[in-house]
Image (cartoon, rainbow, N blue to C red):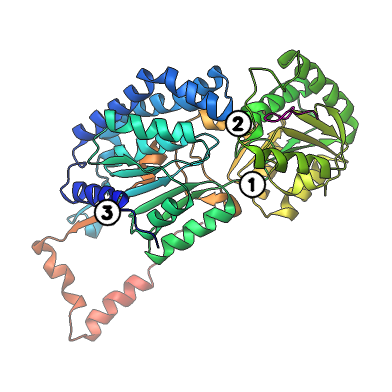
Amino acid sequence: MTSYPHIDDIYSRLRTTYNDGITFPLEYRRKQLRQLALLVQENSEELCAVLQADLGKPKLEVILTELLPIVSSCKTAIEKLDEWATPEKPEVLDWRKSFDISIHPVPRGVVLNISPWNYPIVISLNPLVGAIAAGCPAVIKPSEVSANAADALARLLPKYLDPQAYAVVTGAVLETTYLLSLKWDFILFTGGCAIGKIVASAAAKNTTPCALELGGTSPVVVADDADIDLAAKRILWGKKQNSGQLCVSPNHVFIPRHLQDRFVASIRSNYSTYFPSGTVSTPDMSKIINGSHHKRVLNLLASSKGEKILGGGHNEVNIELTVLKDVPADDSLTKEEIFGPILPIVPVESVDEAYDIIRERRAPSPLVTYLFTNQQELREKFLRGVRCGSLVQNDCVQQLGVPELPFGGVGDSGYGAYNGKDSFDMFTHRKSVLNVPSEVEPMLEPRYPPYTPSSLSIFEGMLSAPLPEL
């Protein structure tokens, strides 16, 4: 394997910083969190510009989805850090109450965050909020695909954060492979399932815990009682985010067949409102990240048996937001994550049919299922019966804007979760601390050899004690 002395230097520097306890004091953590927020606030124009260059992202969406969450997370972490870092005193049985028992949230250690190209700023820096708050030195490995964002992070981070504790490593597959050969104390990876398996395998070689934030074919179900116009408005908005290049993008829509035409009419109306001149050249749509993804999305669109009702055009960098109706339930667009600006509408005989299709597929498990209904019974049915990372009712993508909710998948869509306090928890080890005082020694005498009948009877009595009544 090719060696990278600069990566070795960074790793050694951060390991020394952790071993010396520099990141442990809460005041140090608060200062770094404030500096991270300042990085975003003072360089917002540059960050908007690099995301425009990489992905064609509209400034409004950059601020809303990439920058505001970081500043908000920093503010919350600064305000809540004392509370989050306070040791817990668990409830214990009466005979143990004289013990000194506590649970201390301590840093996991030196951590690695491998972030993706589609949201290169927020997925690089928002988890870093949790790492800083937890007291962990961290390396960020941004995707080389969004090169301008990666370069900006590498240039800006050491100007604001302690370079002895936080670093950015740029590069491509070889650099990432080398990083994964090192022994980290925790790894966060966000990306596709295939690469996620490689990361998990590399982590397992060093018995390193990790969290995988992957993708999945996140379905939408529109029930008979849904507000069709509002559902169309919100689903179309969710699909347009980053031109569908989003792990929680609504992948396809199941709707009762008798409502499809009404839903399509509302989609048309909202489409013309959002994009009066179409979406290929509008400044309000992101571009496809590169040529290979552009080709992949067009090939996927060509393979569908659905009827195109909106969009379908493209130029060398953009693909129109394309809506199809009468898409078969087993169509290629429903079986894999589209990750592009295509919205298939799948008519079904009933919501129960959609429910059964989602349950029977199971793989890949959706990162999120979107359900448009006001029926509590139907919500409970999906809550109990559909295996997915999140269930979102009557909106799309909005779960990412609620930091009190953990963000994470299940099964093929990943494991582990972060956001808000869950970010702190992800990078924290709950260390058990126990002090057994000498004065309880008489109570402990029955545990020592030689084992006598009277000692045995004590423990047999405990074993056969009555169970709680139901």
- Residue in view at x 27 percent, y 81 percent: 456
Q: Determine which of the numbered discs, if any, sits on residue 397 in the image.
A: 2
Q: Which residues are magenta?
A: 312-320
Q: Determine which of the numbered discs, if any, sits on residue 431 in the image.
A: 3
Any magenta on residue 316?
yes
Along the line of sight, the residue nearer the viewer: 179 or 134: 179
How crowded is the residue under tag 1: few (<14 C-alpha within 10 Å), some, or many (20+)? many
Along the line of sight, the residue nearer the viewer: 15 or 158: 158
How crowded is the residue under tag 3: few (<14 C-alpha within 10 Å), some, or many (20+)? some
Residue 152 coordinates in the image, percent (x, y): 40, 30
Any magenta on residue 43?
no
Disc 1 marks which residue?
216
Badge 2 or badge 3: first in the primary sequence: 2
* Of the two numbered discs 2 and 3 in the rendering, the one whose residue sits closer to the viewer: 2
Q: Secondary structure at mark 2?
A: loop
Residue 28 coordinates in the image, percent (x, y): 20, 34
Q: Secondary structure at mark 3?
A: strand
- Residue in view at x 85 percent, y 21 percent: 265
Cα separation between marks 2 and 1: 14 Å
Do we see residue 467 in this rendering? no
Contact flag, marks 3 and 1 (Cβ < 8 Å): no
In this image, 185 relative to 217: left or right? Answer: left
The amino acid type, in three-letter code, at marker 3 is Lys
* Of the two numbered discs 3 and 1 in the rendering, the one whose residue sits closer to the viewer: 1
Contact flag, marks 2 and 3 (Cβ < 8 Å): no
The amino acid type, in three-letter code, at marker 2 is Val
Residue 454 coordinates in the image, percent (x, y): 23, 82
Q: Is residue 114 above or below residue 432?
A: above
Cα separation between marks 2 and 3: 35 Å
Contact flag, marks 2 and 1 (Cβ < 8 Å): no
